[in-house]
Image (spheres, grey):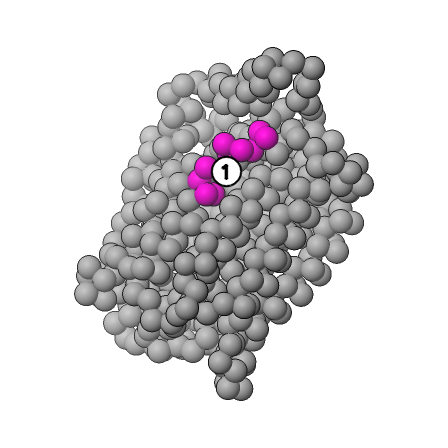
């Protein structure tokens, strides 16, 4: 694929639509990742407790179980007005807005159980909307447009990181400003600001045209028992068996294993990173500026470059390079923990870490997107994405416990996270030629 073909993948107005879809997907992670983590930690919860609170992300690992349901069932009235995908997304967005309003009325010291329960609700709704968002994004591009598909993967990552990092930038800056002004409810009032951002994104969402899926399997209603059997067969069994038929049983399992293992180290680090920044002496504004603001700029630039690399050399080679880079950059955070709160080193670590993460995310999204059967887009993509989330969620929930077990030795912690990528890279290296052939762009 020549450079002009690669660049044409980005020069497509559909990329703006995919950017917004990615932003909507990434935004809830600001709430149940950055906000909840720091909110609970500042209220006195231990690292271990904060880490295990991250088990709410487990729902992302099982959303494929109900992906066939919302992929096939239409929302009365709203589906006809907005389209099937957008109807579900708008409903999920409304639930998150209500959850934020409820958070704004609570305090962790008095309402911890309810706060975590609402966070779980946000996670369930966010995981559910990702099913529709992923399908909506993939269906913006035709199956034979491989350059646009990979460009779309890069833009998806940019969008996700824009929702996550710029959303986090706004949240942390606003909460820091409220706190500096003496507002005791600085977190709660920050959530109201987040509601405003969500409303703006939803205005853009309803303007995106929706393409019909390449195959529709409506749920029959004449015979309830027959309807259940046909629904299970067409929407669960056939998509899953179809994946193994297309790839072979051994290769299918190998793909599952790689997807499960690849981002475990990154998840361990990511779950505790904002706690680490705060503990070594950086303010919320510092974190917003360097980790979110500067991190977003780096992510945008190097995600585009990462997309070019993935399109030019293939997602498998890009994944190998990205895995090595992710492990290497984690060591920088060990050095930062030993040196102390040095701003230039913080900036350097964030830039290089986001550079590696950008490469990894683009290659990873492209890798999964190119493997799915377009007849079962939502189900198969949700399955693969869920497997990756399972590895990150279940293991990373013990990240706080690991830091506490190490006596708060952040340096050793980050070295351990760097080593966690090795098993997936060995697996990818062994299966590289086969996977390259299957995901060749």
In the rendered image, the vertical position of residue 335 relative to residue 314, given as above or below: below
Q: Tell me the quadrant of the picture where the C terminus can be found.
A: top right
The image quadrant that residue 58 belongs to is top left
Q: Residue furthest bottom?
A: 181
Instruction: Name the residue: 59% across, 30% down.
Output: 69
Q: Tell me the quadrant of the picture where the N terminus can be found.
A: top right
Residue 126, given in percent of the width and then of the height, sits at 55, 48
Q: Main secondary structure of the magenta part?
A: helix
Instruction: Name the residue: 39% across, 70% down.
Output: 109
Is residue 332 visible in the rendered structure shown here? no
Is residue 202 visible in the rendered structure shown here? yes
Instruction: Name the residue: 47% across, 51% down.
Output: 120
Instruction: Name the residue: 68% across, 48% down.
Output: 90
In the rendered image, the vertical position of residue 279 relative to residue 70, given as above or below: below
Residue 403, given in percent of the width and then of the height, sits at 25, 61
Q: Residue furthest front?
A: 110
Q: Mark 1 Cα within 10 Å, few/some/many (few <14, many 20+)? A: many
Q: Is residue 64 magenta?
A: yes
Question: Which region shows up in magenta?
Answer: 59-69
Residue 439, given in percent of the width and then of the height, sits at 52, 30
Q: Is residue 248 magenta?
A: no
In the rendered image, the vertical position of residue 49 relative to residue 368, given as above or below: below
Which structural element holds mark 1? helix
Q: Is residue 398 left or right of residue 157?
A: left
Residue receiving disc 1: 63
Total labels: the figure holds 1
Residue 413, given in percent of the width and then of the height, sits at 26, 59
The image quadrant that residue 153 belongs to is top right
Q: Is residue 106 left or right of residue 146?
A: left
């Amino acid at each position: 694929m020549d450079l002009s073909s690669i660049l044409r993948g980005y020069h497509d107005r559909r990329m703006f639509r995919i950017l917004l879809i990615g932003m909507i997907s990434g935004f809830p992670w600001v709430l149940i990742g950055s906000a909840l983590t720091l909110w609970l930690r500042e209220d006195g919860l231990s690292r271990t407790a904060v880490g295990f609170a991250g088990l709410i992300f487990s729902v992302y690992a099982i959303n494929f179980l109900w992906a066939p349901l919302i992929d096939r069932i239409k929302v009365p009235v709203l589906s006809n007005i907005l389209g099937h995908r957008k109807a579900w997304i708008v409903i999920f967005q409304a639930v998150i807005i209500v959850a934020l309003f409820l958070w704004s009325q609570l305090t962790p010291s008095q309402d911890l159980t309810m706060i975590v329960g609402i966070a779980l609700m946000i996670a369930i709704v966010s995981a559910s909307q990702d099913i529709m968002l992923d399908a909506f994004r993939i269906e913006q591009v035709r199956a034979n447009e491989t350059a646009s598909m990979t460009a779309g993967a890069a833009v998806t990552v940019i969008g996700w990181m824009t929702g996550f990092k710029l959303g986090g930038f706004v949240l942390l800056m606003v909460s820091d400003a409220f706190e500096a002004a003496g507002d005791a409810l600085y977190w709660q009032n920050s959530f109201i600001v987040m509601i405003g951002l969500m409303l703006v994104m939803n205005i853009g969402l309803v303007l995106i045209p929706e393409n019909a899926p390449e195959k529709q399997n409506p749920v029959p209603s004449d015979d309830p028992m027959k309807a259940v059997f046909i629904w299970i067969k067409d929407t669960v069994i056939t998509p899953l068996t179809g994946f193994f038929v297309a790839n072979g049983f051994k290769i299918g399992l190998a793909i599952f294993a790689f997807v499960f293992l690849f981002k475990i180290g990154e998840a361990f680090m990511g779950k505790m990173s904002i706690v680490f920044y705060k503990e070594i002496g950086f303010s919320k504004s510092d974190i917003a500026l360097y980790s979110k603001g500067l991190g977003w700029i780096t992510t945008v630039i190097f995600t585009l470059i990462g997309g070019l690399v993935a399109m030019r050399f293939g997602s498998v080679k890009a994944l190998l390079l990205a895995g090595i880079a992710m492990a290497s950059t984690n060591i920088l955070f060990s050095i930062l923990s030993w040196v102390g709160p040095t701003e230039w080193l913080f900036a350097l670590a964030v830039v290089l870490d986001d550079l590696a993460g950008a490469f990894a995310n683009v290659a990873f999204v492209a890798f999964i997107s190119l493997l799915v059967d377009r007849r079962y887009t939502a189900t198969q993509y949700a399955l693969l994405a869920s497997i990756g989330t399972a590895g990150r969620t279940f293991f990373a929930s013990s990240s706080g416990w690991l830091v506490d077990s190490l006596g708060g030795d952040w340096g050793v912690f980050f070295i351990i996270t760097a080593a966690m990528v090795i098993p997936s890279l060995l697996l990818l290296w062994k299966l590289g030629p086969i996977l390259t052939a299957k995901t060749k762009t």
